[in-house]
Every structure is written in structure tokens, then in C-alpha cells.
Amino acid sequence: MSGGTGARPTGQPFTGPADAALREQWRRERRALVRRHHPDAGGDAEQLQDRLAALDRRYVFLERTGRPAGPPPRSPLTRIRSALRRPARRLRRRRYIDL
């Protein structure tokens, strides 16, 4: 399996990232999920399968793109708008004037 190229055929189960450090982290997270949600430990088998599949999807995305799955980074324009709104909100909250 080559890392980051998506050479794995569809339908073949994900067996972990190619990078050794990332693979170790993936393995630890999988084991923690299994310990917490395994049916022999009082968990639900369907919930365990769903959470393991979500974890695998997250690591497949991380392996392909090199960045964690999550919301896209904010654009500079969005950051500027937020920075300009912040002082206006603070002024509206005050019920007194600084002298």
C-alpha cells in the first residue's frame, strides 16, 4: 500500500495509514474504541462498527490530503470581518462610558 496516492482499490478494507507514526496513533485510537464499545464490555456492536468506520474514514482522508478532516480553514477576508465586528460587540455590551 502506498501512502497518500489512493492506490487501494475500493471495497478493500482500510488496514491503517502507511506512515508508521500515524499508523500507531490510528491503532491506539481503534483499540480505545474497541475497549469502550465492545459488546463483551457492555457496548453495542452496531455502534462499535459505526465508530470504527468513522475513525477509518478520518484516517483515510488524513492519509490522502495530509491534513485532518474538519472544517476548511477560514479565509483572510472572514478573519478580517470577525476582527472588525469584535470591538462593535464589546461597545454594545457596555452600559457605561470610560472617562
Image (tube, grey):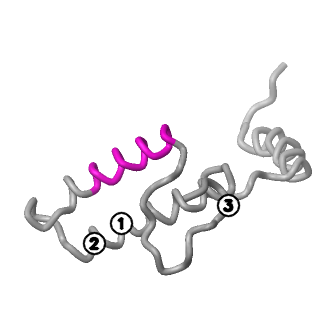
How far apart marks 3 and 1 lie (CA) works out to 25 Å
Residue denoted by label 1: 51
Query: Which residue occupies 84% across, 46% down?
Result: 79
In front here: 39 or 1?
1
Q: Contact (CB < 8 A) between labels 3 and 1? A: no
Using the numbered discs, state the Cα–Cα distance from disc 1 to disc 2 in whole angstroms: 6 Å
The kind of residue on which mark 2 rests is Gln
Q: Nearer the viewer, mark 3 or mark 1?
A: 3
Which residue in the structure is indicated by mark 3?
5
Where residue 98 appears, as percent x and y from the top left, is 81, 23
Examine the residues drawn in magenta and state their main secondary structure.
helix
Report crowding for label 1: few under 14, some 14 to 19, many 20 or more residues within 10 A (C-alpha).
Answer: some
Q: Which region of the structure is painted magenta?
A: 20-33
Q: Is residue 27 magenta?
A: yes
87 relative to 41 in the view: left or right: right
Q: Residue at x 76, y 39 (%)?
A: 90
Q: Mark 3 or 2, which is nearer the eye?
A: 3
x, y percentage for residue 62? Answer: 60, 54
